[in-house]
Image (spheres, rainbow, N blue to C red):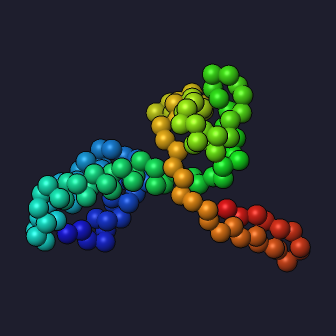
C-alpha cells in the first residue's frame, strides 16, 4: 500500500527517529494495508514491529571492545560488558534540541552477531580497517 516515495519518507523518519512523522506514516501504512486485504489489527502489529526496529536499527554498529564513558563515574565500560550485564549506564550523547553534550541512560544494546570485517589496502600501502 506504499509507493516508493512514501516508503522513503518512512525510512528517513525511522533513521532520524522522528516520532511525529512516524505517527503520520502509520495512518497511510495501515490504510494501504487495509486496501490490500490486511486487517487493521495486523497492519498495526506490523507497523509496531517497524517502529520498534526504528529504535535500534539505524544506530551505529560497534564492536564489543568499544568503550563508553560512564557519566556517573568517569570510568570506561565496554559495550560487551554492558550487553552481558544488562546494567545500562548513563553515557554522553548530543541533545537533539540544544545540541549540548548531556548524560543519558543507555536504553538498549542489541547484538547482531559476528560480521565480516574487510581491510582496505591503498595504493601507497596503507591499510584502512573496516567494520
State left or right for residue 70 relative to residue 8. Answer: right
Q: Is 12 rendered above or below residue 93?
A: below
Q: Is 12 rendered above or below residue 90?
A: below
Q: Residue at x 36, y 50 (%)?
A: 52
Count numbered badges in the picture. Answer: 0
Visible in this render: residue 9?
A: yes
Q: Residue furthest right?
A: 125
Q: Percent position (x, y) of residue 112?
A: 53, 58
Q: Is 55 rendered above or below residue 33?
A: above
Q: Residue furthest bottom?
A: 123
Q: Percent position (x, y) of residue 14?
A: 39, 53
Quadrant of the rendered image containing residue 130: bottom right
Q: Residue furthest top?
A: 72
Quadrant of the rendered image containing residue 36: bottom left
Given residues 97 and 83, the one toward you in this image is 83
Q: Residue at x 46, y 55 (%)?
A: 57
State left or right for residue 72 relative to residue 32. Answer: right
Q: Percent position (x, y) of residue 128?
A: 78, 65
> Which quarter of the figure is the N terminus placed in?
bottom left
Q: Residue at x 37, y 46 (%)?
A: 18
Q: Residue at x 33, y 60 (%)?
A: 9
Visible in this render: residue 102?
A: no
Given residues 97 and 68, the one toward you in this image is 68
Q: Percent position (x, y) of residue 90?
A: 57, 29
> Which quarter of the figure is the C terminus placed in?
bottom right
Amino acid at each position: 500500500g506504499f509507493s516508493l516515495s512514501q516508503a522513503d519518507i518512512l525510512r528517513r523518519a525511522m533513521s532520524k527517529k522522528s516520532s511525529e512523522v512516524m505517527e503520520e506514516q502509520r495512518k497511510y501504512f495501515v490504510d494501504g494495508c487495509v486496501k490490500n486485504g490486511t486487517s487493521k489489527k495486523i497492519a498495526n502489529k506490523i507497523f509496531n514491529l517497524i517502529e520498534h526496529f526504528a529504535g535500534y536499527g539505524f544506530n551505529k554498529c560497534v564492536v564489543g571492545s568499544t568503550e563508553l564513558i560512564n557519566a556517573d563515574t568517569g570510568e570506561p565500560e565496554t559495550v560487551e560488558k554492558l550487553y552481558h550485564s544488562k546494567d545500562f549506564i548513563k553515557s554522553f550523547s548530543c541533545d537533539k534540541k540544544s545540541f549540548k553534550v548531556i548524560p543519558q541512560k543507555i536504553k538498549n544494546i542489541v547484538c547482531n552477531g559476528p560480521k565480516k570485517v574487510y581491510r582496505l589496502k591503498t595504493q601507497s600501502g596503507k591499510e584502512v580497517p573496516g567494520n
